Image (spheres, grey):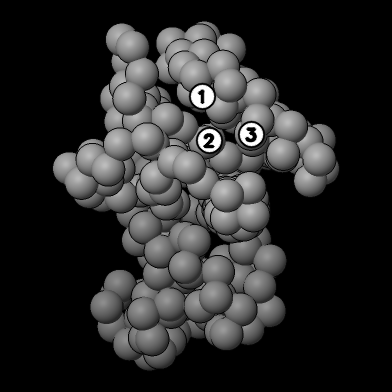
Amino acid sequence: MTTPATVFLVDDDAAVRTAVTMSLQQAGLAVRCYASAEAFLTDFPPDHRGCLVLDVRMPNMSGIALQQELSKRQITLPVLFITGFGDVAASVSAMKNGAVDFLEKPVTPEVLLSRIREALGHDRRMADECIKRESVRQRVERLTARERQVAGLVMRGKTNKEISRALDISYRTVEKYRAMAMSKLGVGNLAELCHLGRYATALLTDPPPAQRGLSDHDTSAPKSN
């Protein structure tokens, strides 16, 4: 079940929280407000999608510190900073750490809403990428070590003859492993395999320890999901 996208607003100014919340809710967006970075970290469910609208200067943990903490926790929620202070150093740090934008107060509702919609779009794309990567990871795990070797070499443009020489196995054996790998990965041709490779290159070229050292004649059944 997909979690609805939410705008998480963190600002120690109650008036700002009220004004921004009303504006975003009128635009049909779901909003959750916090008066501090600590309150947000305590309440935030890591599986939620959306974006974070974050003030820079707050008591105790600053907005920049919160952004860094999210990075440590590998939480990829897009961050949009708003601040009443033209802090160039903070802006540079925020953008280097992946902030979507850095806006100075006062920000018009139209500009803020536009930037938030861009951030939500970015989050949707990241979520889609995560789903695709997980799907590919599960399929790759079904391959034997030799199937992964062959598929990796195919993705790098090697012909069956070249793979046969590189792995010191027969041409027919290469064909067998190639066909089995394509079937398990759910691809029907080289173009589809190469497209899948953007998600699986590292996995295909680095078999897990449990599968290393299998013989050319390994015929173990695919792992069950």
Q: CA distance from mark 1 to mark 2?
A: 8 Å
Which residue lies under the disc numbered 3? 20
* Dot 3: element: helix
Residue sitting nearer the eye, 21 or 84: 84
Q: Nearer the viewer, mark 3 or mark 2?
A: 3
For disc 3, the neighbor class at 10 Å (few under 14, some 14 to 19, many from 20) is many
Q: Is residue 108 left or right of residue 171?
A: right
Measured from the top left, where is residue 138 in percent x and y?
A: 60, 47
Residue sitting nearer the eye, 67 or 161: 67
Q: Amino acid at mark 3?
A: Val
Do callouts 3 and 1 mark residues in contact (Cβ within 8 Å)? no
Q: What quarter of the picture does the C terminus occupy?
A: top right
Look at 79% across and 46% down and name the residue there. Answer: 27
Which residue lies under the disc numbered 2? 52
For disc 1, the neighbor class at 10 Å (few under 14, some 14 to 19, many from 20) is many
Which residue lies under the disc numbered 1? 10
Residue sitting nearer the eye, 217 or 104: 104
Measured from the top left, where is residue 102 in percent x and y?
A: 38, 48
Tell me, yes or no, if residue 94 can be seen here: yes
* Dot 2: element: strand
**N-terminal-most mark, 3 or 2:** 3
Q: Is residue 194 left or right of residue 166?
A: right
Measured from the top left, where is residue 35 in percent x and y?
A: 52, 14
Instruction: Identify the mark at residue 203; answer none if there is no mark.
Output: none
